[in-house]
Amino acid sequence: MAAEGAPPFFTESIIFLAATVVAVPIAKRLGLGSVVGYLAAGAAIGPFGLGFLGSGEDVLHVAELGVVLLLFVIGLELDPQKLWRMKRDIFGLGTAQVVLTGLTLYALCFYYGFSTEAALVAGFGLALSSTAFALQILQERGQLSSPYGQRSFGILLLQDIAIVPLLAMVAILAPHEGPSTGQDIAIEVATIVGAIGAVILAGRYLASPLFSFLAASRAREIMLTAALLVALGSAGIMHAVGLSMALGAFLAGVLLAESSFRHTLEADIEPFRSLLMGLFFVAVGMSLDFSVLVDNIGTIIGGVFAVMFVKGAFLWALTRGSGSSNSDAFRVAVTLPQGGEFAFVLFTAAIGAQLLTFETANLLNSIVILTMLMTPLACLGLELIAERLKKSGVENPAIETFEEATPTVLVIGFGRFGMMVAQIVTSEGLEVRAIDNRPDRIAYARKLGYKVYYGDATRADVLAAAGADKAALIAMCIENDRVMGQSIDLIREGFPNALVFCRATDRAHSLELTRKGVDYQIRETFESSIAFGKAALESLGTPAERVAQIEEDVRRRDEERLALQLKEGIFAGADRLHTVTPRRRSTDVAPPETVT
């Protein structure tokens, strides 16, 4: 317990933080990933380790919010059209994996002495993979958007949905005093449908106007509060009717995926998600009972290898048979062979329904935790094999689809300047993403068919969420010189591979951008002023040849003046402003015409 006078959980928080600060970097250095570090930290400080903390069950209830926020963020990254395109992986591949794996593990459990009811719960509970664990691995390796990453996500999503009928199975298998009436079932179904409808309607018609209203206040903390409210509120509605909280948060995220605030919401939620996900894995590690592990070491090791082999074999066969390459099928197989966090939920419900004893559930929980620990080792082994194959000349191409090869342009600032830039870039068929911090401008652009998102260009997390890490070129079209300067510094530091093209508001700003070393910059009125002056001369009767000569000379003198100003200050080179362009003599060779 915390010392007298200290805030509640103060000492416990210090122990949590110290353990993770030590364990996670070591695990990352060994190539095992941060998740193994969190699990090891929890096992070390938990009641079955060094005993610094008591049961992790209370912590787990709070830490499960990390899974909720993870699914909300994943939902933000999927628009409904993309989700519909994944229906084959979700409902076909995912359902086949759960059913086939569950029945096979059920048969094994039944063979080793489980009752029919206990074997069903154990088999299908072990058939579920860890959404939190697998997605964390995919995100750390930058593979979530890859073909095999998307197929893995489709399977995981179906497994999250599957927890609902599996919990219903536990209720059906449990001994009842009397059967449920048809009216009770109808009321329960109507309640579930009503909850799902409420989340859909709120996400579709209320969330975006709410965020538009709050964005006008320019109060970041209010936007953050609203983001948490939407994620946790939708999860709470689903939980109230007996559905998965993670599923409710995911649904809310999908409904907001086409909102102009998706990138800001993602950036705001991410720190809370990361912290709570770490806490979740620490709590899972704390629940690993070493006495059960020692007393049943043979059974547990056999169970770990049986679960991972059965799941891995079915995952490889199903993904291979449904069109994936052999390498992608193996990647899916080594990413999803572990037990999942929903297995803990299912086994706990089975204890309450008297289908599993506490000792059996503890045994199954140990198997689940050890499969989690083994998964990064399996991934590491596959990477080593792939590296050897690569050295032997067998190598997969880095770009597997033409869509991935298409460069993207991130436009920051979508006023009249940014809109014209976007129009030109999209005319070549390139993908354009755009962010702005004015809700009225975003609403206007969306009415014209542009997908523009709300975002602060001075936040590296927002730039990353908007796709700056994947952009081939970043077009800085904002009016505020100070904001542009801060954003350029962030881009140069965090996304050095992107070309940076800038709109300069005036001559002083142009000089500043030149000093920052941007790839291209232009004063916003320079070209329009040149065109205006040429039109004036033509209207006054100046020959076209003379107008072209003047334009060439003015551009040359402007470049000379900029070079002088970089060295001597803003007032240098003033003499270049008032020089009359010498007339070209008839003996002079005219410059070649520019083909436009």
Image: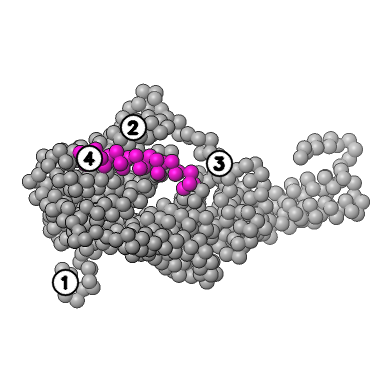
Which tag, 2 or 1, sits closer to the chain's start? 1
Asked which colour scheme the image uses, the reply is: one colour
Q: Can the viewer see residue 29 in this picture?
A: no
52 or 253, nearer to the observer: 253
Please state the horizontal and vertical placement of residue 538, each as a whole percent of the image: 88, 51
Residue at image mark 3 = 407
- Res. 453 image quadrant: bottom right
Magenta residues span 82-107
Which tag, 1 or 4, sits closer to the chain's start? 1
What amino acid type should be assigned to the residue bearing mark 1?
Answer: Ala
Which marked residue is nearer to the observer: mark 4 or mark 3?
4
| Mark pair 2, 1: CA separation | 56 Å
Residue at image mark 2 = 317
What amino acid type should be assigned to the residue bearing mark 3?
Answer: Pro
- Res. 7 image quadrant: bottom left
Which tag, 4 or 3, sits closer to the chain's start? 4
What amino acid type should be assigned to the residue bearing mark 4?
Answer: Leu
Please state the horizontal and vertical placement of residue 379, each as a whole percent of the image: 30, 38
Q: Is residue 250 magenta?
A: no
Question: Element at badge 4?
Answer: helix
Mark 1 nearby-residue class (10 Å; few <14, some 14–19, many ≥20): few
Residue at image mark 4 = 105
Residue at image mark 1 = 3
* Dots 2, 1 in contact, CB < 8 A: no
> Going 63% across and 54% down the picture, which residue do you hit?
449
What amino acid type should be assigned to the residue bearing mark 2?
Answer: Ala
